Amino acid sequence: MPGRPRMPASLRNTFTVKKGGSSSQLLSLNIDLFRNLIFFLFLLRWTRKGLLKLKGRGLLGTFADTYISIRRTLYGLFLRAPGVRSQVEKQVTEAITKLQTKLIPTGPGVVRYLTLPKEGWSDETVLKELETLASMDHTKWEDGYVSGAVYHGGDALIKLQTEAFGKFTVANPIHPDVFPGVRKMEAEIVAMVLAMFNAPSGAAGVTTSGGTESILMACLSARQKAYAERGVTEPEMILPETGHTAFQKAGTYFGIKVHLVSCPAPSYQVHIPSVSRLINSNTILLVGSAPNFPHGIIDDISSLSKLALKRKIPLHVDCCLGSFLVPFLEKAGFETELFDFRLKGVTSISCDTHKYGFAPKGNSTVLYRTALLRSYQYFISPEWLGGVYASPNMAGSRPGALIAGCWASLMNVGEIGYINSCNQIVGTAKKVAEAISENPGLCNDLEVIGKPLVSVVAFTSKTLDIYDIADAMSAKGWHLNSLQSPPAIHVAITLPIVKVWEKLVADLEAVIEGEKEKERVRIVEGKGAKGKSLGDSAALYGVAGSLPNKSVVVELASGFLDTLYKA
Ligand SMILES: *Cc1c(COP(=O)(O)O)cnc(C)c1O
Ligand SMILES: *[C@@H]1O[C@H](CO)[C@@H](O)[C@H](O)[C@H]1NC(C)=O
Ligand SMILES: *[C@@H]1O[C@H](CO)[C@@H](O)[C@H](O)[C@H]1NC(C)=O
């Protein structure tokens, strides 16, 4: 501590100084005063922080947060205790080894290329090896067994995209004079997506490498705007807890504090009064999803927009997943809600062309209500020795081929094509949701989360361990997504799944029956623990996920990332 609050005494001293004290006395008294002043500023700052926290989270919320953080620290200490530490390390190493054997092919047939071939391979040899790589044993996305991931996969479109790539392999939009066609296509893609989201005149956008980059850019723009216009140096943003984690990545990358707001049942939309309470002078951005990734629910964007307007704070709507579905819900004859620029408070929108826009992977857009907002994400380096440098987003050089692939896809599918696919995809999602809530083999054990209006159907189990169901579905060749808090799984319907949804439902019924049978056996034989090894869904989310401090999960995930780069 820099000192104790002795202001009155020192003030008294300052006055007595007038009666001819020596200059050294004066100096020491001034230092004293200065020190006390600093201390008061320090106190003021922390009091303000404490009060904002109380206002934002309420008394109970503040207590709960403190309790959770104490538990986390204590559990962290426990994990580091000598005996425990070695046990944990052993388990983590085992799990990572298991992961490696699953991901890295082994056996006599596998040849590893760890250095450049001395002499380049012939075209035929390269093509033959590529063929082998493409047909490595994998989860069959081609047959519709994977949730999300591959959004179109139609042969004709793939062929067209490949041809578009071929024509623009060397193109790089960083040189618009060398590749004018790429510049034109990129600008047109932005214009088309702006029109889909009812952007007002004066609106602007850029293309990016994916939803994550679009979200990073929207957060950066909001941060720079708040700094330039309001001098905010300790930025904060308010997210639904169901919002994509790319916003938390933005928080980490750009030093923005993240407040998470719960999305309570039965609507599972972000709780608006809680958002309102968290707003303070440091708030740079509010966020809503249309829809969110975990549960496929569209937040109450109208209310968020009203709040944003009233408090004069930017509002970002994450349509990365909604992409080319939500703008067409109405035209495809489905129920919808307002989510785009027609709501005056919405200042930016992210929309992935590479999800339901069916463009090749590595493509997304971020749209702004005004060109000024867009300019806040620009990076311009006027004095660089390499020349004046300006780039609109994260990357420097960018593949023109992808832009051509994206443009070709949008032009090829067209509005009617997107309305048709919306019809099929959302129609299938509704059938799956209906089956889960009404089929006798499913409705007693499963429960759909909220009321999904788009392509994702998330569900929990009232009677069984949902992660056991996820693992059993994996054993049947399906790749569904496991979720946490609450424990659930989801399926994101894509065109390949549209053709096999009935099999999905049938397999789900079989799995439920199987799990119930196992449960009966367990009860009869009186066996408690189910014996899991870290690495299954059930262990990762059920066991490790329930720990108060997730450092074990962090270690596992970090080991997973290392595995990706093991040749
Ligand atoms: C997929 C997704 C993103 C991020 O997109 P990437 O392209 O994977 O970076 C963001 N928000 C939502 C809701 C998404 O589903
Ligand atoms: C969680 O545990 C790890 C390992 O013991 C520790 O380093 C970390 O600080 C803990 N986290 C918190 C928030 O206390
Ligand atoms: C597609 O991805 C490339 C590579 O990241 C990027 O340069 C380009 O701007 C993207 N285009 C679109 C339309 O999303």
Image (cartoon, rainbow, N blue to C red):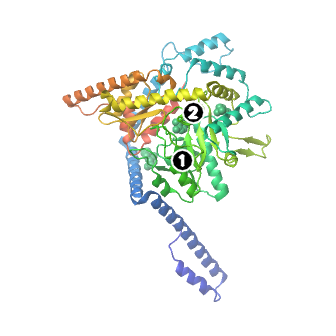
Residue 90 placement (x, y as % from top left): 39, 34
- Say whether residue 455 is left or right of residue 250: left
Mark 1 within 8 Å of ligand 1, using the beta carbon = no
Residue at the spot 56% in from the left edge and 20% down from the top edge = 154
Q: Amino acid at mark 2?
A: Phe
In percent of width and height, residue 344 lies at 59, 50
Between 154 and 233, the one nearer to me in the picture: 154
Which one is in front, 447 or 96?
447
Q: Is residue 359 left or right of residue 146?
A: right
The kind of residue tagged 1 is Val
- Identify the image quadrant of residue 385: top right
Instruction: List the residue tagged with mark 1.
Output: 287
Q: Quadrant of the image for the C terminus?
A: top right
- Let me know if residue 534 appears in the view: no
Q: Are marks 2 and 1 in contact (CB under 8 Å)?
A: no
Q: Nearer the viewer, mark 2 or mark 1?
A: 2
The image quadrant where one finds ligand 3 is top right
Q: Residue 128: give x, y in percent of width and height.
A: 60, 11
- Residue 460 relative to residue 175: left or right: left
465 is higher (above) or lower (below) than 311: above
Label 2 packing within 10 angstroms: few (<14), some (14-19), many (20+): many
Indicate the quadrant where residue 228 lies: bottom right
- Kindly tell me whether residue 293 is visible in this rendering: yes
Total numbered labels placed on residues in the image:
2
Which residue, given by chain and number where applicable, does mark 2 sit on? 324
Q: Residues within 10 Å of mark 1 (few under 14, many from 20)?
A: many
Residue lying farthest to the bottom in this orientation: 19
> Looking at the image, is mark 2 or mark 1 earlier in the sequence?
1
SS at circle 2 = loop
Rendered image quadrant of residue 169: top right
Residue 461 position, x and y percent, is 33, 35
